[in-house]
Image (cartoon, rainbow, N blue to C red):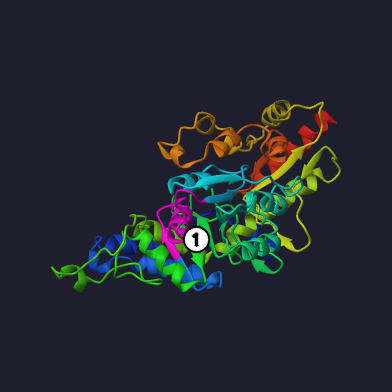
Amino acid sequence: MSEALGKNVKNRIYGNEYKYVKEVLDTGFSSSQGSRMVTRLEQAFAERFDVSYAISHINGTATMHSVLEAIGVGPGDEVIVPPLTMASTTFVVLQTGATPIFADVDPDTYQIDPKSIEKRITTHTKAIITVALFGLSPDMDPIMELAQKHHLTVIEDDAECFLGEYKGKLAGTIGHAASFSFQSSKHLTAGEGGITVTNDPELALKIRRIVSLGYAGVGAGKGKISKSDIQEPNYSRHIQLGWNYRMPELCAAVALAQVENIDALVERRISVANLFSEVIKDTPWLVPQYVGPEYKHSYWTWVVKLNNPKISWYDFRNKFVELGGDGIYGTWKLTYQEPMFQEKNFLGREKFITKENLDSYQSGLCPVAEDLQTKLFQFKTNYWDYAKALKQAEVLKAAIAFFS
């Protein structure tokens, strides 16, 4: 995929989105016609990522919850997560009644640190959720080695990382399962939705049943029970507890069209990030996220660290906006520093967490992440009008000149 192709994308909705949505509407939502787009989406996604199974979901949080439920995570179990990310990665652990354990991050890549993970593993640890933060894969080899040693499941949260690579492998194909999001800000979007991938047939079947109300008639690659089954009065439908996490056909139709154009949609973001990277190459106090030689960054956002104590985060951001910038996003407050953690407002699930772990959710738990959180600038990369991206790069250049 050439950078030029990325520059030629004029709108993120430019393929078969309208055509496929019309196909769904033309069915009148007949149940006998249902799940055709879902099936096509799952097959296309699995083929593009060269995995055995792709299972669509209503959103990119349900994706992770379903995997945790499928592997039997529950009260008394611990799941290791990073604190520097969207809180959903932690929420899904609480949804199961398990305990989130926060591992610190690498100071240069901002990804979950394998050394910190190792220190957090106990006899209660059952899984690790990694996050490909901002579009960059974590260092997966040592994480997978720890998982093998301690018999843990690794779930890759790749909501922000489509077509990112780690040592020649696509992010999402390294752990035991991976979660992707089609929420509106992501590389691919259906407005909302998500998808889980795995190569494990047994795990895929368990996930499918979690997603589909515990139906007996679904399968690892089959998301809908047959019409003949549901017409039978003595048919036993539900063989276990499950949730209704199924993706609607309309979302699947849009997501399918987006998958067909995944290379160009991702390349646009990379080309915009390259513009910004060129601007700061001689600015030592704006430090870009480190990308190792064996990695490919997919740049959900382009992120730099402010490394100048004489310039405040707010002063730089305000000057950028004053000069015509679209704004700069900060990073999420660390999950354990959010009010819900400080007030232990877990809707009753706090009763499953030991006092020792509850008391650990305080400042000082992950010092590297705490230091980074207030210093990071996130710049948008989803500029479909390339002229606007060029303008933002010039504004960034002017803001740097003002403070230099």
Q: Quadrant of the N terminus?
A: bottom right
Whether residue 8 is in magenta: the answer is no
Residue nearer the viewer, 226 or 281: 226
* Label 1: how many Cα within 10 Å (few below 14, some 14–19, many 20+): many
Give the residue at x 39% y 69%.
39
- Residue at which label 1 appears: 258
Q: Quadrant of the C terminus?
A: top right
Residue nearer the viewer, 371 or 365: 365
Quadrant hosting residue 84: top right
Q: Give the range drawn in magenta.
A: 55-77
Query: Judging from the image, what secondary structure is the residue with disc 1 in?
Result: helix
Percent x, y for residue 283? 84, 40
Give the residue at x 33% y 69%.
218
Relative side of 383 to 94, left or right: right
Relative side of 117 to 400, left or right: left
Relative side of 216 to 376, left or right: left
Disc 1 marks which amino acid? Gln
Percent x, y for residue 189? 49, 54
Residue nearer the viewer, 39 or 129: 129
The reply to whether residue 117 is in sight is yes
Whether residue 68 is in magenta: the answer is yes
Q: In this view, does 172 lie above or below 90?
A: below
Relative side of 256 to 87, left or right: left
Percent x, y for residue 346? 45, 36
Percent x, y for residue 26? 27, 63
Residue nearer the viewer, 213 or 223: 213
The reply to whether residue 8 is in sight is no
Give the residue at x 19% y 73%.
228
Quadrant hosting residue 85: top right
Q: Is residue 55 above or below residue 383?
A: below
